Image (spheres, helix red, strand yellow):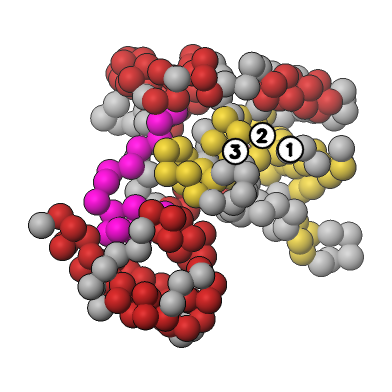
Amino acid sequence: MFMEVTAMETKNIILQLRTERGMSQDELAEKIMVTRQAVSRWENGETIPNTETLKLLSKEFNVSINTLLGAPRRLICQCCGMPLEDDSIIGRDRDGSLNEDYCKWCYADGTYTYSNMDELIDVCVKNMVNENISEEQARSYLKNLLPQLDYWKRYEELSDNGQFDEFKHQLVNEINELHIEGMPKLDKLNALIGKYVNPEYTLPNNSKVKFLNDQKTYLGNQLECEFGGERYFGIVADMDFILVCTYDKNNVNGTNVTNPELILYKKR
């Protein structure tokens, strides 16, 4: 019964994804190295793709295998516990394929971004506290949940022996050595998604430009200006660059910061 339901859902999903991209059955078949008849059988609900073909379809359409199968599983990040309800927040392996076990914040381009459970809890608690959940309740919930997740249960097997933490430490030192006026000392860098930290800057020639990829995961933080007022410093970095900007405080939690000003963009 499950396979019948899955096949029915999958046929509509593949048909929709193919037609949205203006592809014929022949074109899709060529891209994923199957026959046109195989594509036709999927879309007629006669069969569903095998595991390896689902991986190819996932990469071609940029959606998760879970989505292709009609979302039969409730995915959660196996590092932080976040529900993976949207393919856009799923982490990616080094080859760009989606890894349905993790979110973008915890797993980026094949790299696990957290090795300290307490540090992760500190980050998550800030996003969970609201009028219905206190900080104490959020912290207690995470302390119970995280040890049950696959990443933390297999930490010794999955960890990189501190290499990524060492890279973050090096980046923090490089940023502090810039001695930017008014910016307090940076203590740590967190995983950030590009679309949340990618404002449009006005250059001296009045042209406007964005420097980041909305879909990529970076390292960064925000710091209150030492001079007070309503400005925050925003720091974003990765293997290739360091970016420092300022913006108005009233929108620090939004995707559209107010009055962003680029302070520094430095290639590493």
What residue does disc 2 label? 220
Q: Which mark is residue 237?
A: 1
Residue at left 41%, top 72%? 17
The magenta stretch spans residue 73: yes
Spot occupied by residue 254 in the image (x, y as percentages of width and height):
52, 47
Task: Residue 137: name its quadrant.
Answer: top left
Q: Main secondary structure of the magenta part?
A: loop
Q: Which picture quadrant has residue 13?
A: bottom left
Reading the chain from its start, which is encountered first: label 2 or label 1? 2
Where is mark 3, residue-wise?
A: 110
Q: Amino acid at mark 2?
A: Gly
Question: In terms of sequence position, does the residue under pointer 1 or pointer 3 come before the other?
Answer: 3
Question: Image point 29% across, 26% down: which residue?
Answer: 133
Alpha-carbon neighbours of circle 3 within 10 Å: few (<14), some, or many (≥20)? some
- Tell me which segment is drawn in magenta: 63-79
| Residue 77 horizontal/vertical position (percent) | 40, 35
- Image location of residue 200, percent across then percent down: 70, 58
Q: Is residue 266 above or below residue 203?
A: above
Q: Is residue 225 shown above or below 108? A: above
Under tag 3, what secondary structure? loop
**Marks 1 and 2: in contact by CB < 8 Å?**
yes
* Mark 2: secondary structure: strand
Nearer mark to the viewer, of 2 and 3: 3
**Residue 251 seen in render:** no
What amino acid type is highlighted by mark number 1?
Answer: Ala
- Where 250 falls versus 96 (above or below)? above
Q: Residue at x 54, y 36 (%)?
A: 107
